[in-house]
């Protein structure tokens, strides 16, 4: 445990142990904070990411610093983060400050310059995001909203929207998400049971296709009990 404390010098093994401990602890802290901190990098998420990275980086580059202080600081910040998230869920005023309501950047094909100034983005950035959304002309946009996480939501005017099956009065079957019953040559027993099938049924299907279970990279089954197989190439 000498690597845990500040020293004049560290051996290569001690540096490796420090990196492993720091990385593992940061993973645990991120797991405790939840997936929100990964999928939605908002104000508090961006702040905590910068601070945690900075705190844990110092002991990994300076042998004179111990890991204890960094771990304590990271633990406290994680708790504070969870408290702030809880407060934002409970108090509307605090939530509106932390995660402000979206506001329009484009409305009825017209660019709202005040919205660009409020979002602190340039016209070039707006046009770039529009191109990413496959929008050719701004006048095709009925509404574009600046979201709290820094993204832009575009809504095309009805005359520029693609026809849907509902528009054409076509009735389609309900959406079905296939279940993965084999992955990397291994049977997913829990999912296979969920589909109402057993190993015997699966092996018989494999025999019909003249393959073994280990030859299958991926196999899925839909609501119609159709098995689709993807072999190793």
Image (cartoon, rainbow, N blue to C red):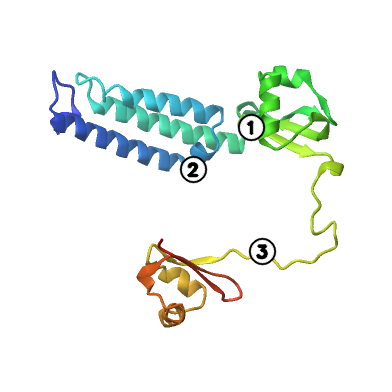
Q: Which residue is mark 3?
A: 175
- Name the image quarter holding residue 5: top left
Q: Are marks 2 and 1 in contact (CB under 8 Å)?
A: no
Q: Nearer the viewer, residue 77 or 187?
A: 187
Between marks 2 and 1, how big is the CA–CA gap? 18 Å
In the image, residue 121 lies at what x, y percent?
Answer: 66, 20
Q: Residue at x 59, y 63 (%)?
A: 177
Q: Is residue 87 left or right of residue 17?
A: right
Q: Which mark is residue 151?
A: 1
State which tag comes first along the sequence, 1 or 3.
1
Q: Which residue is mark 2?
A: 35
Q: Residue at x 18, y 22 (%)?
A: 6
Quadrant placement of the C terminus: bottom left
How many C-alpha atoms fall within 10 Å of the one at disc 1: few (<14), some, or many (≥20)?
few
In the image, residue 108 lies at what x, y percent?
Answer: 85, 31
State which tag comes first along the sequence, 3 or 2.
2
């Amino acid at each position: 445990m000498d690597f845990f404390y500040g020293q004049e010098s560290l051996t290569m093994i001690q540096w490796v142990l420090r990196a492993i401990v720091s990385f593992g602890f940061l993973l645990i802290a991120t797991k405790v904070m939840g997936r929100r901190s990964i999928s939605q990098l908002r104000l508090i998420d961006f702040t905590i990411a910068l601070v945690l990275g900075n705190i844990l980086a110092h002991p990994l580059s300076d042998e004179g610093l111990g890991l204890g202080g960094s771990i304590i600081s990271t633990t406290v910040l994680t708790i504070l983060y969870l408290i702030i998230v809880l407060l934002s869920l409970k108090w509307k005023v605090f939530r509106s400050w932390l995660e402000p309501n979206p506001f329009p950047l484009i409305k009825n094909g017209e660019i709202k310059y005040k919205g660009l100034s409020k979002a602190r983005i340039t016209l070039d950035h707006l046009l770039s995001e529009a191109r990413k959304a496959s929008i050719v002309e701004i006048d095709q946009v009925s509404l574009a909203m600046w979201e709290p996480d820094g993204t832009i939501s575009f809504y095309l005017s009805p005359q520029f929207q693609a026809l849907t099956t509902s528009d054409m009065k076509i009735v389609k079957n309900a959406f079905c998400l296939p279940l993965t019953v084999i992955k990397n040559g291994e049977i997913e027993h829990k999912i296979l049971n969920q589909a109402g099938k057993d190993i015997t049924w699966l092996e018989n299907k494999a025999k019909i296709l003249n393959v073994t279970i280990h030859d299958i990279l991926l196999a899925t089954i839909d609501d119609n009990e159709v098995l689709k197989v993807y072999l190793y190439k």
